[in-house]
Image (spheres, rainbow, N blue to C red):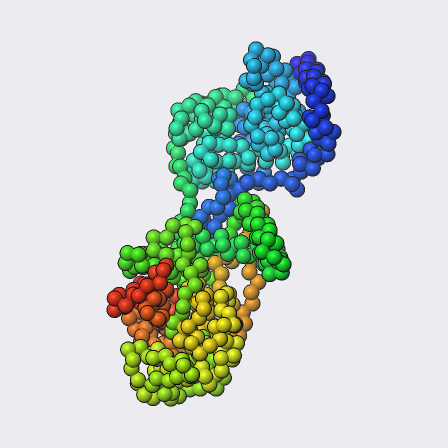
Amino acid sequence: MRVFAGYITVISFMLIFFTTLFFATDEWNKVQSFQNELEHSVSTDTLNLNRTSLLLDQNGKVFSEVNRPFRLYIPDEQIPPFMKDILVASEDQHFYEHVGFDAGAILRAVVKNLVFTHIQQGGSTITQQLARNLYLGQEKTYNRKLTELFYAHEIEKSLSKDEILELYLNVIYFSNGVYGIETASQYYFQKSVTELNQPEMAFIASIPNNPGKYDPIDHFDQTKVRQERLLDILVSTAKLTKEEAEKMKKVPISLNVRKKIDLYPDYAFYVESELKELISIHEGYKVELAHASSPKEKEKVAQKLDERFQEVISSGVQIQTGLNPELQQKSVKALNEQLQQELQGATVTIDNKTRTISAMTGGRNYQKYNFHHAFQAFRQPGSVIKPLLVYGPYIERYQASITEKVNGNRYCIGDYCPINYGGVNPGTVTLKQSLAQSYNAPALRLMEKVGIEQAFKSLSSFSFEKVISEDQTYASSVGGFTYGMSPLEMTDAYTSFIDGMYQDSHAIIHVKDNKGNILYQWKNKPKKVWSADTTSKMRKMLEEAATSGTGRAAYVSKPYVGIKTGTTNNYHDYWVMGMTDTFTTGVWVGHDIPRNMSQIEQQRPSHKIWKQIME
């Protein structure tokens, strides 16, 4: 009788509602297509839950969370039955019987609300709450409540009870910016809901009824009272015995509140930037940007890419990276300890075996999303360009011996007459000595023999974004470029001296959706840049520079160490590029607005940073 009376009330209420709509033309027109809209909206295909994406280090450990609100999704099969039982018992005891709304509950709510000018009690089922959370918001008006009934009924038609409960348990609010039971479990206890004991499950199940009142952090005692009430409800619904409930009430509840994980901002920001690039390549935005016919069209494509990036981030992806936490900490420490006030710098470390980026620093005392010097700063490379643009191509073309002699004295081509550091004229030197001491005149002579075009053909093997045709002059032999290179680009290129092969180094290994499917991964294949003979010779020359040349202040005791240094005109930039048997690391030191740093040259800040990282 109670259910029958409830249905009569609901039907009467709907008739009043539609009669009102008839006199409101605007609303009536909306109703005409309401069913079509419902069928389109209420579908798992169009469902778009805002979830937290996770960045994982090389050990699979989370080091950064991206996107708010905080929501970790858990599928139905992993949700403990006790958690389902207690939320159904407390929120909607007739969940498995009704068609989206509980007519009896609505009747009671209508009677109660007649004495108020606005809705006090809603009689909402789990399905109605799901409809509110997914589609409608929390506004309390009679029109909204009736719209909610339509959505709830359509949800029941479209989804199974298990699917509805799974979604509900993943979308409901648990206070403190936390959504979903898995998230609540991780936030309040720092463990998965599958690891909670039953009293802990009952405790967090107490929160959604009134997230403000039952906030476990600010109102622990009230939440505990609510927990015990829920256990009593389970007794009344025969899900627990009274003895079991009383025993659970006595189990201590100890919160272990989890702070948001936001470690290694230098690396995390780069990962987000790289993810956008990965999406752009995989989904065609990069091609669209390249073929955009006007700045306005390019802006539209860029906006679409931004929206798609936010969509991916909001879907709760897991981004597996090559981050080495220990190296990252060492790198940040080295940069901050060795740089003086106002001086800036950046470091990049790449794993020789996997070619993944193991560590990266964006600047002194770097704050997330600030200008990132490792990949956003383009500076003149100085002499660190010589192995890539001069010596490598020369040896490759002429199969030259590293003991081959070259004139080290000052040399001019036309009006271009670079001088050696300190103005020295060393006379005849070997190629090995020339690189180790970073003489400029021999580099110019060798480039003239190779030819500018051939030298830049070798350079085109690498991912130098801002090398342009105007750079093809003899000044480039000692690092004179229009825009220059980023520390990441330079370090990346030096990995070609590991084994003669080159492929773009990346932070991201793969990106998976919340079901474990791989969405994106880099498909770059290694390509041969240097022959085995050239590679071997270049490694010996770099080793000479590390042991007795300009890199000796950075030397570390490893099975192999090869280093090249660079200083640009007027001492605007200091570089150290080099590798050991396991890692390739690049260091840049300078100012955001270039200025003369000759007064700190003898302090060797770039050398000290490199050494501290690689020791």
Relative to residue 100, is residue 190 drawn left or right?
left
| Residue 380 percent location from the top left of the image | 40, 68
Residue drawn at point x = 35 percent, y = 66 percent: 573
- Nearest to the observer: residue 483 or residue 257: 483
Q: Quadrant of residue 159?
A: top right
- Nearest to the observer: residue 376 or residue 140: 376
Of all residues, the one furthest to the right in this rendering is 32
| Residue 371 percent location from the top left of the image | 41, 54
Q: Quadrant of the C terminus?
A: bottom left
How many callouts does the rendering have? 0
* Residue 398 can be seen in this image: yes
Residue drawn at point x = 53 percent, y = 27 percent: 86
The answer to whether 410 is drawn above or below residue 46 in the figure is: below
Relative to residue 33, is residue 80 drawn left or right?
left
Residue drawn at point x = 43 percent, y = 50 percent: 369
* Residue 193 can be seen in this image: no
Relative to residue 162, is residue 25 drawn left or right?
right
Of all residues, the one furthest to the top in this rendering is 115
Q: Quadrant of residue 334?
A: bottom left
Residue drawn at point x = 49 percent, y = 64 percent: 505
